[in-house]
Amino acid sequence: MNKPTLVELEAFFAREFAHADFSIIEAGQGMATLRREISTIHTRPGGTVSGPTIMELADAALYVAILAEIGLVALAVTSSLNFNFLRKHAADRALIAQCRLLKLGRSLAMGEVSLFSEGLSDPVAHATGTYSLPPTQEIANHE
């Protein structure tokens, strides 16, 4: 299995998820950090960043951390995502997601993601998630 470079991960997301509007800051060694600029399309009435915007970035960070370890396998899918919103995200700041894998097995991967308003130390949300991984043979066929 070849672990992808940051450039290869970015190209994969550009090709497979053209709607993805985040940057991969770092990925590898069981971790990933993503950054998303916030604009009016990410807010709900009252100027608050929407929950789905924050949840999407957490899910993407988990996916990136996993792919950085197993290779570019589009068939890995979310099987659970548990979320705690802790405080309002500062809509004038980018959203940062920091993921750490807790387990990477043959059929499941689990991780946690902390999300921050860029430049602030208190997290705005925390998530844990599990991904179902395709059988090893399917991973080998997609490399």
Image (cartoon, helix red, strand yellow):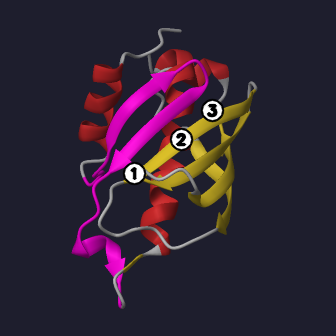
Amino acid type of disc 1? Glu
User: Residue 135, which numbered label?
Assistant: none
Vertical order, 68 against 87 (above or below): above
Identity of the residue furthest to the bottom in this view? 45
Mark 3, secondary structure of its residue: loop
Residue on which disc 3 sits:
134
| Sequence-first tag of 1 and 2 | 2
Residue on which disc 2 sits:
98
Mark 1, secondary structure of its residue: loop
* Residue 101 is covered by the magenta coloring: no
Distance between the alpha carbons at the discs numbered 2 and 3? 24 Å
| Sequence-first tag of 2 and 3 | 2
Q: Which residue appears at 31% of the width and 47% of the height?
A: 22
**Label 3: how many Cα within 10 Å (few below 14, some 14–19, many 20+):** some
Vertical order, 43 against 19 (above or below): below
| Sequence-first tag of 3 and 1 | 1
Residue on which disc 1 sits:
118
Magenta stretch bounds: 19-45
Picture coordinates of residue 5, whole percent (x, y): 37, 16
